[in-house]
Amino acid sequence: MLNAMFLSKAGKGLIDQVYDAETQKMLNERLHFLDGLYQQDAWKERREDCAQVEVLFSTWGMHPFTAEELATYFPRLKAVFYGAGSVQFFARSCFERGVRVFSAAAANAVPVAEFTAAQIVLAGKGYFQATAQYSRGEHDPGRAHSNRSHGNYHVPVGIIGAGMIGKLVIKLLRAYALPVMVFDPFLPPEKAEELGVTLCDLPTLFEQCQVISNHLANNAQTKGMLNYDLFARMKPNATFINTGRGAQVVEADLVRALTEQPDRTALLDVTEPEPVEAGHPFFTMPNVFLSPHIAGSMNNENARMGLYMAQELDRFLQDQPLQYEVTAEMLATMA
């Protein structure tokens, strides 16, 4: 049996939530587990144990190891199974050491896509501003805002980035009569046809879509990509949704566009930085609705990520085709 270890500075409680009892039973039948590392820098104090580890299982709270740290403390490491989403902050160091990386991004994508699709449908009804106005006692304005919305029948929805989450959102929207337009320079036309979407550039997407949802990869190339030139093109009563990353939005530009056209709406589950700084205009703008980064896996949903990693381990050990391995090339288009 290969030697394995759980690692997360977020603590054993989170590990047990992501890798629940049933999943841990599966893993213990296949691997020999050493005591886990659950405190900040605990791996530095247990160098002898770490030197035996061939497989690491982690989740949020994974240390961003450098290649040098991996060589020093985990010289026998073969694979990291990351029971969460983005591996951008540690994967390259693993690749330098020839360590294979597996991510449960596909599992984490499910609740993000569900959250986003729900917001898209509600936005189509003018729900957010209408209910806020109604709750303030502005009955007629609330009803009026909802009546100005276009509903969810033959109204274009824009998806920015058709990666793992974007594709899932598109599939969920098939239950509705909503044409989908997509900006994604990495999506081939034949794949767009398979998904049943229309490819377009960003200006066209912002001009024509009533609801726009951001799912861009999180990297240097996408930082600040969504700016005033695009937000100013949004239609009356249009909604911008961000469950991707806050760094892709020039927030001052979004504030300006929303101020100029108050019937536009922004639904922001992510910002830059997080949490939003005290005194930011977002807190007082009636057409901005903030949520505290809750679209991703939480509570019971976390166990899906651990299960995906346990199932991938089976494929890894049995030399079967893998589903969730991350390569260096994939990082360019991943969140």
Image (cartoon, rainbow, N blue to C red):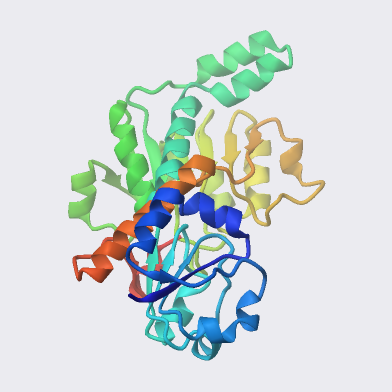
Number of marks in picture: 0
Who is closer to the viewer here, 42 or 270?
A: 42
Up-down relation of residue 157 to residue 63 (above or below):
above
What residue do we see at 34% from left, 62% from top? Answer: 29
Is 77 left, or right, of 256 in this rendering?
A: left
Is 59 left, or right, of 43 in this rendering?
A: left
Who is closer to the viewer here, 99 or 167?
A: 99
What residue do we see at 65% from left, 8% from top? Answer: 140
Who is closer to the viewer here, 293 or 50?
A: 50
What residue do we see at 39% from left, 62% from top? Answer: 28
Up-down relation of residue 134 to residue 289 (above or below):
above
Location of residue 57 in the rendering, given as x and y in whole percent from the top left corner = 45, 66
Location of residue 107 in the rendering, given as x and y in whole percent from the top left corner = 39, 50
Quadrant housing residue 136: top right
Location of residue 34 in the rendering, given as x and y in whole percent from the top left corner = 49, 72
Is residue 57 visible to us here?
yes
Location of residue 154 in the rendering, given as x and y in whole percent from the top left corner = 32, 25
Is residue 204 visible to us here?
no
Of the 4 image quadrants, the one containing the N terminus is bottom left
Up-down relation of residue 120 to residue 102 (above or below):
above
Up-down relation of residue 335 to residue 74 (above or below):
above
Who is closer to the viewer here, 159 or 58?
A: 58
Residue most toward the top? 140
What residue do we see at 45% from left, 48% from top? Answer: 303
